[in-house]
Amino acid sequence: MSKTSGSSASGTTPKMKGDKVKVFYGEKQALQDVDLEIKPNEVTALIGPSGCGKSTFLRCLNRMNDVIDICRVEGKITLDNEDIYSSDLDPVQLRARVGMVFQKPNPFPKSIYDNIAYGPRIHGTASSKAEIDEIVETSLTKAGLWEEVKDRLMEPGTGLSGGQQQRLCIARAIAVNPEVILMDEPCSALDPIATAKIEELIDELRENFTIVIVTHSMQQAARVSQRTAFFHLGELVEVGDTEQIFTNPTDSRTQGYITGRFG
Amino acid sequence: MNSFFLLLVVIGLSVAGYAAGRARSVLAASGDVRILHSLPSYYGMFVALGCGLPAILLLALWLIIQPQIVEHMVMAGLDPSIMPQNADEYSLMLTDIRNLASGNAVSREASPAIMAAMERYQSLQSVGFWTMGAAVVCIALLGLVWARSQVSRSFRARNVVENIIRVLLIVCSMIAILTTVGIVLSLIFESLRFFARVPFFEFLFGIHWSPQTAIRAEQVGASGSFGAVPLFAGTMLITLIAMLVAGPIGLLSAIYMAEYANPKFRAIAKPMLEILAGIPTVVYGFFAALTVAPLIRGWGESIGLDVASESALAAGVVMGIMIIPFVSSLSDDVINSVPQSLRDGSYGLGATKSETIRHVIIPAALPGIVGAFLLAVSRAIGETMIVVMAAGLAANLTANPLEAVTTVTVQIVTLLVGDQEFDSAKTLAAFALGLVLFFVTLGLNVIALRVVRKYREKYD
């Protein structure tokens, strides 16, 4: 799981790239020909009204859609120019490189420590207790949770508050040391203060990780992201620098959505 | 003409009362039912209940009380020459009179005095019956007329009917509860009689079980011993073998059903597995005794082991097969109720399916699975038919699954089968064993249900 050199070679080489991505749930087409580049060490926000396909696209990026029987993906998605849907790539390895944080905090019913240690243990990246201890501490520190929980690492993760649980889930994702972190509306179940903490955290994480975030809040997209992609009815309408999308959108549908005329 | 016919008459009157009440309410509303407090059917129901309920209650009471009054009158009016001297004679004579009246065989020559008593009995019976019929029909009619007179626009028939129905439901549930309490009390009282003969600690901790008591004092072998430890040990051994079979198979099949099987396979396999639970235990019993036990003995002999023809192993294995559906069906439910978000979280970290199951799903479902196991254990402990047929009767205190052992339930059956007197220590021992069994399974069920409930609360 070493980081490939491509990510730091130049700021413009995409970390991940979708090429004519189509997704079907049974007969119904959920995404049509999405071409999207995700640049390294940036936060890319996917916005759009409910049911527009932004979460579907996000779940394609680490093949979480494989879990759904009736879901079928066409087109090509690459991670560092490797096709992630090719048969020689194991989705389990892919997910170690492309981590995910979900809408609702979902800590495992284990201690805080074991929640973080889960990934390193199953991937065998840390063998000794000391190594795992270190990973737990650095992950929790990066997620801004260490100071709050360092004295109760052995207490169940489910006993934390909602915002702390979500930061625990982020720490859990970081502990595997992924290259990309996908976040599916990570703040929608949280109050404004917890949301602010997570947003701050996302901005810090950008230094080490590439982040793709789905959000319903346009303010959030504007605050945390460098690039924004607007989805509508299963189509990628427009993608560009966040500032440009929010101040000077080229498509009238984007304009309509960000000014609140629909959605 | 009998009381069943009378019941039909009362029901017929109630139906008529329903129609009358309904019609009268429509009349009271002068055709516009919206101005009534309740729907017309509630008025009908009110009149029907007013007619039927008191009449049926009276009928039931009468049927309980009348025989006692009649019998008392007959016996009090007996010819003094044959007046019985003690309680036994009294009840014997009463039985004779009753049998004579209904034309059954009797234990003595029918003397004129007895015949007179019999005729008196018959005439009192028939007088009683006709009085009862008249009274019941009268009450029914009175109830009907009174209830019908209550019907008016503002009468709250719905509330009254709902209340009556509520009371009826309470009565029904009380019957179930009181029956349980009654059974437990009878177990306790009979057990107390047993412990008056055999010391409590000798029963619980004695290691020799030989429930022989003399019927006559001078009989040989008059001393029995009632140490129940071999029975408990046998029960535990068979339960352990059963759980060793049912636990892994049930749990692993539940995991397959819940996590791996595609919906089509699941739709077929799950009902098939549950059919196992519907097979009568006596069928399992002869499967164990006629197929599995000889098979095990055959294998044992071929590798030079001495296996009893009725072995704990055979009974335990078959019982294990019987309780597989309990374990698998309950475990399947708890595994399914582990939230999908936990699976997603684990997959999202790059865990494989089996890692997710081992490290996330099973720990999350563990309390529920433990509950399922405890319920299965309590089922295995109380199971009777398989062990009666396949485990044997010898109360051996052994941990060797190839020997015959006996269980608490088997001993209860053998103690009570056949002609027994109901006040010897031998038969009373069955109640003491039943009491122990009851408390053990009750305890297991309470713990299991608590565990399962606690688990449900966590994720709902």
Image (cartoon, rainbow, N blue to C red):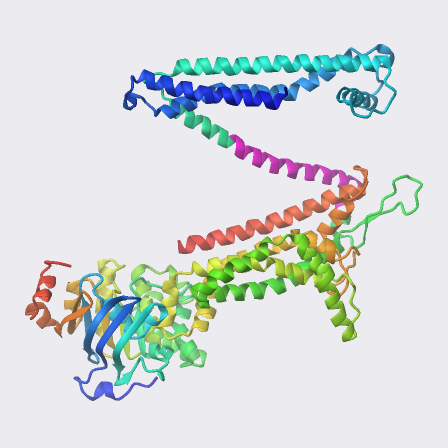
Stretch of the chain drawn in magenta: B171-200
Spot the residue most to the front. Answer: B1
**Residue beneath the point at 37% across and 74% down:** A136
The location of residue B183, given as percent across then percent down, is 65, 38
Query: Is residue A147 visible from the viewing direction of this image?
Result: no
Residue A149 vs residue B255, the one in the foreground: B255
Report which quarter residue B401 is drawn in.
bottom right
Q: Position of residue B350 (x, y in %)?
A: 37, 75
Query: Looking at the image, which residue is at 26% across and 84% down?
Result: A80
- Residue B184 inside the magenta-drawn segment: yes
Confirm whether the magenta stretch covers residue B298: no
Using residue B304 as the reference point, say whether residue A4 is left or right of it.
left
Which quadrant, please, contains the N terminus of chain B? top right
What x and y, as percent, mark residue B19?
Answer: 42, 21
- Up/down of A85 relative to B70, above or below: below
Answer with left or right where residue A140 lies relative to residue B456.
left
Residue B275: x, y in percent?
56, 56
Asked if residue A248 can be seen in this view, the reply is: yes
